[in-house]
Image (cartoon, rainbow, N blue to C red):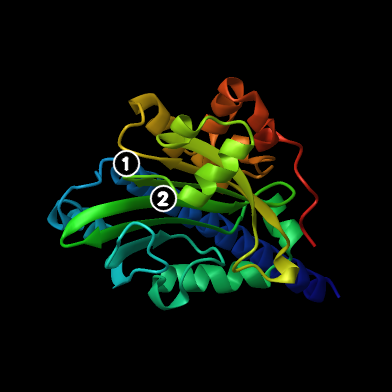
Amino acid sequence: MKRNTSRVLLTAAAVLSLALICYGLARLYLSYEAGRAARMLKELRTVEVGGTEMSFLPLAREFEGFQRPAIAPVNGEEYEYVIQIGPGPLAIKDHMTWLDKIASTILEAMNRPFRRAIGLRLWTAFARIGVNSAQVTSIYGGVIVEGKTEWLGGQWQLARSTPQQEAQLLARQGIPWQDTQHYFMKLDPLTSGFSRAQGTGISVYSWFTPSATSNEKQSASRFYMGCLTSRQGCRTVCDLVPGASEYVRIRPNASELCSKPAQGYQ
């Protein structure tokens, strides 16, 4: 009897040890990937509209970027380079690293509330650089992550001009037309790419042009990467994109950016 009890205890201890090792490895891997994502997004901010294709190729190669035809080009892009890091559901599966594929499969199979509670959150950091005639026409960066109660996103785009349709809409909301031509933010739901089981989310979108100030560019493109590895999870997009809080202070009519989060998880 004692021998059987000892075997059960040893088995339980071995299973617990293995679980703790696997958890530690998962946390280590996601932290490592979050560090890579932070470096990628930082280097992305050095790419300039009008720059040469050759100028950013080292960035694309370092982070396993790939080239594809431009999707819905609005700035005259002929093709674009795409970079993605992380095991989130919005990543293009065919271009995920084998480690991200394994991590994505394991994490998506786990109980979601438990997984998020122990800090194993799904997320994706991404970049797109549009090119025409070997020159950069647009730069796009962002992060999508599981927050405390819903998916959170921060996305920015730098191009020679802001989308006319968006600028007209914001002008009707009281934001002067001339301001929308160099820098603005707005809130939009996250819908594409998410299944009903994964829940809903919200994202802050930032557009700016080369005429934006350095502070505005930094505000729009800076992310709090701790949201990717947090056990508690970030609550609103203003936690993920600190610049949204700054934007609200200068644009009170944009107060919805930091509004109370929805209960978006299933």
3D distance between C-alphas at marks 1 and 2: 9 Å
148 vs 251: above or below: below
Q: Residue furthest top?
A: 249
To which residue does mark 1 refer?
45
What's under tag 2, amino acid-wise? Gly
State yes or no: discs 1 and 2 in contact (Cβ < 8 Å): yes
Q: At 55% from the left edge and 69% from the top edge, which residue is drawn?
A: 104
Q: At 30% from the left edge and 59% from the top edge, which residue is drawn?
A: 130
| Spot occupied by residue 56 in the image (x, y as percentages of width and height) | 20, 53
Which sits in the foreground, 256 or 75? 75
Residue 154 located left or right of residue 261: left
| Spot occupied by residue 180 in the image (x, y as percentages of width and height) | 47, 36
Q: At 63% from the left edge and 50% from the top edge, which residue is drawn?
A: 188
Query: To which quarter of the image does residue 12 belong?
Result: bottom right
What's under tag 1, amino acid-wise? Arg
Q: At 39% from the left edge and 59% from the top edge, which residue is drawn?
A: 74
State whether residue 19 appears in this view.
yes
